[in-house]
Amino acid sequence: MRAFSLRLMLLLCIYSIGSDANSAGLENPDSGNPKSTPAFSTPASSIQDSVIPADRATRWNPGILSDDQLQLPLGPDGIPSRVQVCATLHPGENIQKAIDDCPDGEVVKLNPGTFNVADTVQLTKGIVLRGAGSDGAPSGTTIVKSGGGTVLAIGKDRDFICYNGMMPPGVNLVEDGVKESTTLNVGRSGISATSARTNFSPGDLALVDLLDDPTVQQGDCSFFKRLDRRSVSQRVEIRAVDKNTGNLTLGSPLHWNFRAGGSYQAQISRVTSPTIRWAGVENLKIMGGTNNNYPGATAGGIDISNAAYCWVKDIQTSGTIRGVHISLTGTYRCVVRDSYVHHSAEYGFGKDCYGIVLKCGSAENLIENNIARFMNKPIQLNTTGGGNVIAYNYADNAWSTPGEWQETSIDTHCSFPHMELIEGNIAPHIGIETTHGNSGYLTFFRNYASSQFASPAVWNDGSLVQTRNVAAMIFSGRAIGMNVIGNILGSTKTTTATASRTYESADVRVPSIYNLGNGGAGLADVAATTLLRAGNYDTIHKSVVWADAPLKLPPSLYLSSRPAWWPSEMPWPWAGPDLEPMVGTLPAKLRSDTRYNPPSP
């Protein structure tokens, strides 16, 4: 991707919409409802055309788009509806046997109570495991894992699906794979049934990648990619194969320019291990579970690997889990929604106390309407493949030590997450850390980032006030090409962290709206010089700051209209500088405040 300077954005057009931040409800984001909802006349895609240059963004259309397993209408939440029950179990009965015996498209139903398991509950086909409620026993269903290892798994490949050993050697592209296209060309010799390497077939998952260029800084993270120095990758599904032309038609557009030959050597590698499709886990609480491998390898809670069109819905994890709570590894069009992911059995750096994590080229996935709190990284993107959407989640209370250091609520880890959308979340501290390599061209739209965690900011320390690394948005040194559009940023009051004092800084000792270029060249770093900021309200200017003339913001960059699952009594969109008040009610935050308050491990 071309990196170009946008520091001309310092020639700001300040479009004032009120001088008092408190009048916008910024210190109490759920107080009151907007007096009016504007009429949005601008289509969702035009914001990219008019504000975000085409090479800095992609078209987002994530998740499950149709029920190709049973040809039934999707539910209002976009999840396939499954009603045929193959088995109903009481506590003490064998969950794994019921799953193994259940026909595709049907449901294993768990009655209320506690199910104790010694082995990982494994879904290897398209069935649903459904409990009686995520509050757990006695009224709901709890699964308790003993003896270490993952509690629940969709797919068996775990982190192996990331690496070259699970896939045959890549096939070279003979033409550039052009961003936003749905075609790759491997030449006539690149398609042949005589070899697993070239036996491309409709329905295959595959990984497209290319060699790093100077834009991509791998740093110390060679993990979660097929081969070292191939940090930009994308998981794709092949829809059609033309042996005469060598063309492979994909189910989704490319999110990067995968350049053939030269110094890039773009390749596509077939996934030969069976991909799990149409499996779901619903309405459960899970406890226990550990990652018994290197950090980030597998989840202690729910591990989803080499999977497509799978889902996790209304799941509660708990502070009894060691390691990642929900991991999506090498996945395509999977969904995690309506869940409560919280606390850890073991806090510490390198302890994997992460909430929801996407990695290994995962693409087109949707993480929506979840609560993620009291984790080191509540939501994390890790060598992701583009087209993923993180939307309408409440992510708070990122753990750190010392607690005075403010961690990031929605974060990246391990190069090179790219072309992802973070929309409509409450996440007090959002951004891009470059501890393990950089990221590029992520879009942050209509989020509320106050820099103030809910109390207690860090678990078990209710009196703590955070004073270092305090920011609404952070883009560390070498983060490139970030887009920040239509967000509400900053705070005027010190609650759990020192209130915002300046607009931008590279100094972690200065509470700011933007912390830019730390660990790199400071405000001269590409994190600052390639940053696009437009239409954001911040509490330093007490105004909306545009890069140029004000524009109408669309309600969403991935939804064409109000989502069917959104509560009818709550205005949508819920946050933005074009609303009154600018911060309304986010369903996930309201659910956290009413159903899970006070928080408990």
Image (cartoon, helix red, strand yellow):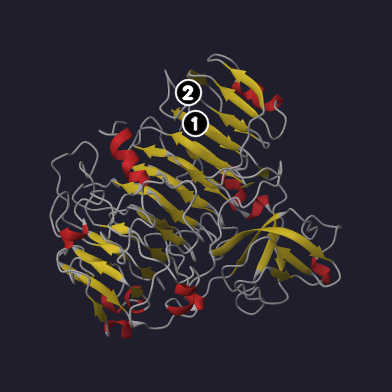
Along the line of sight, the residue nearer the viewer: 243 or 314 = 314
Quadrant of the rendered image containing residue 598: top left
Q: Earlier in the sequence, mark 1 or mark 2?
A: 2
- Residue occupied by mark 1: 283
Q: Residue 145, can we see it?
A: no
CB within 8 Å, label 1 to label 2 = yes
Q: Position of residue 200 (x, y in %)?
A: 78, 59
Q: Could you say whether the residue bearing mark 2 is in a helix, strand or loop?
A: strand
Q: Position of residue 401 (x, y in %)?
A: 24, 46
Distance of label 1 from label 2 (alpha carbons): 8 Å
- Residue occupied by mark 2: 141
Q: Is residue 285 above or below residue 453?
A: above
* Left or right, 318 with reference to 24: right
Q: Is residue 442 above or below residue 303?
A: below
Name the residue type under label 2.
Thr
Q: Position of residue 250 (x, y in %)?
A: 69, 63
Name the residue type under label 1.
Asn
Q: Position of residue 437 (x, y in %)?
A: 42, 63
Name the residue: 40% across, 52% down.
392
Q: Is residue 401 above or below residue 99?
A: below
Q: Could you say whether the residue bearing mark 1 is in a helix, strand or loop?
A: strand
The residue carrying pointer 2 sits among few (fewer than 14), some (14 to 19) or many (20 or more) residues within 10 Å by Cα, namely many
